Image: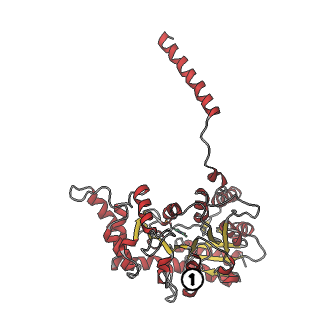
């Protein structure tokens, strides 16, 4: 070893020692809110049980009715718009870089007119990369002292994003977070909370049609929610990701069909579930001009500030796809896609009912919420897996009030749905 190399070795060793010392002396502190989160328990546990089952039964053909992801290919008109948009980006005339953070004006206006029947304006629509990231960013609008209420059971993003931003206490021995208002939604209360009992909530997350219960709130129920928010100066964050699954003309497809909602509600929505954009990514949030904070400032202006700061606009290709989805042809394709999954839902629901299970949802939503009498959720999950080789989602994974239920998803190929139903009838009688 020559001298230079020897010196290098020395320097390297010295650096190693310094690194070690640094490790001991000042490692970065973990965000204490992250430490409060409960381990992402549900889906890893499902996969673990599935894997163990396959080890014991290597030839079993498992069918998953557990997923919340779309399975059918994009439809022709929408696919063409995406590929045309990509091709244009490869030309001198067609190339574009950053767009407006709020989205293409044409798309904002088209969402306002086609989805909201012009009950909201394009200016109030903020296009994004999806409803879930918007839910996370919406948390930035409110202080960490805001009292948060959510449905129990619920889509896990509302609670976990609240925890991450320090809006909850610790996880308690009731398997819930302190300082959160849980609103049980069960068959006993028609999946609508008793708002008299919840005290004062500042922010209310509400999802309809609901994931996981499949319940779609009526006009009267949503009117109660809006009236509560007005009386208590609360803000509703309304998740309408499944609004296109509403068949029943009497059910509201958006919170803005409700009298007074523009003064108290924000709505998030997405093209993920109605046209299979779960991978393409395109959603939006409506923040009405009428919605104000206690100091009189517009919530919409703060939302604009947040989006222009930490979001740089949705993909220009996705936005062209979304524009096509709102054409007459695109809307027709959207209805066909939704009908396909709703037909799946009907097949599953009918089979479960014939077997004597109490089922909810599945008529205006892709999810069927099923009570398995005499079993806890995980027991029912194992039973379904062992007997019929079908994977479902245990209701307890969505909250304490989900105990004893399973969620069946209708996202799947028809032949798999039909096979699953055959097995249910054969093995679960
Ligand atoms: C799937 C789903 C979404 C959609 O989120 P994206 O980020 O737009 O894909 C939002 N809310 C609920 C309740 C969902 O189930």
Report crowding for label 1: few under 14, some 14 to 19, many 20 or more residues within 10 A (C-alpha).
some
Residue at 59% x, 73% y is 419
Q: Provide residue 409's location: percent of width, then percent of height.
A: 58, 72
Q: Is residue 281 left or right of residue 47?
A: left
Residue at 47% x, 80% y is 256
**In the image, is residue 187 above or below residue 10?**
below
Query: How is the protein colored in the picture?
Result: secondary structure
Quadrant of image for the C terminus: bottom right
Q: Quadrant of residue 217?
A: bottom right
Q: Is residue 97 left or right of residue 236?
A: left
Most extreme residue toward the right, as rendered? 374
Most extreme residue toward the bottom, as rendered? 250
Most extreme residue toward the left, as rendered? 93
The residue closer to the viewer here, 392 or 364, is: 364
Q: Which residue is mark 1?
A: 227
Q: Provide residue 303's location: percent of width, then percent of height.
A: 44, 64
The residue closer to the viewer here, 34 or 165, is: 165
Residue at 48% x, 77% y is 263
Q: Quadrant of residue 108?
A: bottom left
Does residue 180 appear anywhere in the picture?
yes
Q: Provide residue 189's location: percent of width, then percent of height.
A: 68, 83
**In the image, is residue 394 above or below residue 169?**
below
Q: Secondary structure at mark 1?
A: helix
Q: Is residue 379 left or right of residue 199?
A: right
Asked if ligand 1 lies within 8 A of label 1, the reply is no
Q: Provide residue 358's location: percent of width, then percent of height.
A: 69, 82
The residue closer to the viewer here, 298 or 395, is: 298
**In the image, is residue 332 above or below residue 96?**
below
């Amino acid at each position: 070893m020559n001298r230079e190399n020897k010196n290098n070795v020395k320097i390297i060793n010295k650096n190693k020692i310094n690194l070690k010392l640094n490790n001991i002396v000042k490692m970065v502190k973990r965000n204490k809110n992250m430490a409060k989160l409960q381990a992402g328990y549900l889906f890893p546990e499902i996969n673990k049980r599935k894997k163990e089952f396959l080890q014991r039964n290597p030839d079993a053909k498992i069918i998953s009715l557990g997923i919340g992801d779309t399975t059918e290919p994009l439809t022709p008109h929408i696919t063409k718009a995406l590929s045309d948009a990509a091709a244009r980006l490869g030309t001198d005339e067609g190339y574009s870089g950053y767009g407006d953070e709020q989205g293409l004006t044409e798309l904002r206006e088209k969402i306002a007119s086609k989805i909201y029947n012009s009950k909201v304006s394009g200016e109030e629509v903020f296009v994004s990369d999806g409803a879930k990231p918007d839910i996370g960013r919406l948390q930035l609008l409110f202080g960490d002292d805001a009292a948060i209420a959510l449905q129990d059971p619920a889509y896990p993003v509302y609670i976990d994003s609240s925890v991450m931003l320090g809006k909850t206490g610790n996880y308690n021995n009731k398997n819930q977070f302190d300082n959160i208002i849980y609103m049980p939604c069960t068959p006993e209360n028609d999946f609508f909370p008793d708002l008299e009992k919840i005290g004062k909530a500042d922010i209310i997350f509400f999802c309809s049609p609901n994931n996981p219960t499949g319940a779609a709130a009526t006009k009267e129920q949503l009117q109660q929610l809006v009236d509560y928010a007005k009386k208590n100066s609360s803000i509703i964050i309304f998740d309408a990701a499944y609004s296109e699954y509403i068949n029943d003309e009497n059910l509201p497809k958006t919170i803005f069909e409700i009298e007074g909602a523009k003064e108290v509600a924000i709505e998030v929505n997405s093209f993920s579930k109605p046209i299979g954009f779960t991978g393409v990514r395109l959603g939006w949030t409506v923040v009405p001009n009428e919605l104000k904070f206690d100091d009189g400032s517009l919530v919409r202006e703060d939302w604009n500030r947040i989006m222009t700061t930490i979001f740089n606009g949705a993909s220009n290709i996705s936005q062209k796809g979304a524009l096509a989805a709102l054409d007459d042809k695109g809307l027709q394709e959207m209805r066909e896609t939704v009908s396909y999954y709703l037909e799946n839902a009907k097949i599953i629901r009918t089979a479960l009912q014939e077997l004597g299970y109490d089922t909810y949802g599945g008529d205006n939503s892709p999810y069927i919420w099923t009570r398995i009498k005499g079993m806890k959720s995980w027991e029912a999950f194992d039973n379904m897996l062992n007997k019929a080789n079908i994977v479902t989602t245990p209701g307890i994974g969505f909250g304490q009030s989900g105990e004893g239920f399973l969620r069946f998803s209708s996202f799947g190929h028809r032949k798999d749905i039909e096979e699953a139903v055959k097995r249910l009838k054969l093995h679960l009688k």
